[in-house]
Amino acid sequence: MTFPPDAPGLLVEGARLTLGGTPILRGVSLSVARGEFVALLGPSGCGKTSLMRVIAGIQSADSGVVRIGGREVTRLHPAERDIAMVFQSYALYPHLTVAQNIAVPLTMRRLSAWQRMPLLGGLLPGSRTARAAIGADVARIAGPLGLSHLLARKPGQLSGGQRQRVALARAVIREPGAFLLDEPLSNLDAALRVTTRREIVEIHRRVGAATLYVTHDQSEALTMADRVAVMQAGEILQIASPEVIYREPVDLRVACFIGSPRINRLEAAIGEDGVVRVAGAATCLHSAARGAVTLAIRPEDWIIPGDGLAARVEHTEFLGDHALLHLRLGTEAVIMRAGPGALPHPGETLRLGFDPARALLFGPEGRRILAHRREAARV
Ligand SMILES: Nc1ncnc2c1ncn2[C@@H]1O[C@H](COP(=O)(O)OP(=O)(O)OP(=O)(O)O)[C@@H](O)[C@H]1O
Ligand SMILES: [Mg+2]
């Protein structure tokens, strides 16, 4: 863990969950420091929402510990955990206006049951001042989320994206110890997604809570987060900064999940001399490991003209600021990202090299193996 168990923030240790005989969480440990934004990224069905439910206390885990703000909350009711959450399926109160919906967490906290009564409440001492303060807080949060002109409407009069932003505003209005956001942008169109992303990051900075943000959109995870936790099949495979996740994946599954187009994977072998060979041809890499391995090269890390592997051009895709070359290297199909300049023709043979500092090697179990540039190497 990156911070001690009693530090403020969010800490999950060894969370296990089995539902109907199926393991859903297989011992998940995760920390989010106060003020930190961690994206939880993984394919559909890998257990992201289940983990959020366990943290929120909606689902109890079979084992494991949850701490929020230095306090163990494993056995506490959701309302006692000092968290705010926005889930994929959010619920607004249909009979309340947007302003009243956003204000719910504050009215529950700052007004007594008597003060909350519709008519009588307004007459009680202190009620007017408290309500004015709540109104000011609602206005402050509604502005950046583009909701100011909608405050008097009911949820039924809003679009899906607007409703989602109301749910977001309601979650962030009271400054909790931890925010749990589960795909809060899934109903927004592409343009609104981009602006709302920025707003979420800004709100997070302002509030300074520990934020755990679930997404299966890798560009969202990479652009928003201080650290990204990559989850698959109920396990967190790696948690690190976006750069490290992209450049230094510890597992082949992380390397393949991050990056678009997908990283190229080539079957390779390391001989007794430690030289990494692809289809019998020596590459520029050397490793202390031996035997069958996977060489993984990102599309942008190929070099042409290189001095080694012969690749036949199958077809090319011009995409404005760059192009994708679809190549065949022996029996394997590989993709190269190239500049938009003169493109090779289908059928041409290219000499392909790669940057040894950026190449990744993985062992038979998919764990990363260290490799380095071979002396006087020719690719
Ligand atoms: N009550 C349940 N009983 C059995 N299995 C369940 C139950 N609830 C969820 N699951 C299974 O648990 C797994 C994880 O579900 P979860 O909702 O956590 O995935 P997710 O990562 O949030 O996916 P998505 O990206 O689609 O939202 C899925 O395979 C799901 O089918
Ligand atoms: Mg989910």
Image: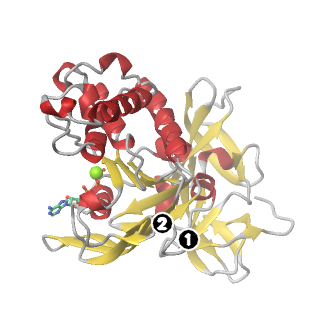
Q: Quadrant of residue 282?
A: bottom right
Q: Residue 300 location in percent, x, y?
A: 65, 44
Look at mark 2 in the image and give the residue it sits on: 31
Toward the front, the furthest residue is 125
Q: Amino acid at mark 2?
A: Ser
**Earlier-in-chain disc, 2 versus 1:** 1
Instruction: Pick the residue in front: 148 or 271.
Output: 148
Q: Quadrant of the C terminus?
A: bottom right
Image point 28% across, 27% down: which residue? 99
In 3D space, how far apart are the residues under numbered discs 2 and 1 (Cα atoms)? 8 Å
* Local secondary structure at mark 2: strand
Instruction: Pick the residue in front: 197 or 344.
Output: 197
Instruction: Pick the residue in front: 39 or 359.
Output: 39
| Residue 93 falls left or right of residue 272 | left
| Residue 222 falls left or right of residue 117 | right
Whether residue 187 appears in this view of the structure is: no
| Residue 18 falls left or right of residue 179 | left
Image point 18% across, 34% down: which residue? 121
Marks 2/1 in contact by CB < 8 Å: the verdict is yes
Q: In the image, is residue 183 above or below residue 263?
A: above
Look at mark 1 in the image and give the residue it sits on: 3
| Residue 173 falls left or right of residue 104 | right
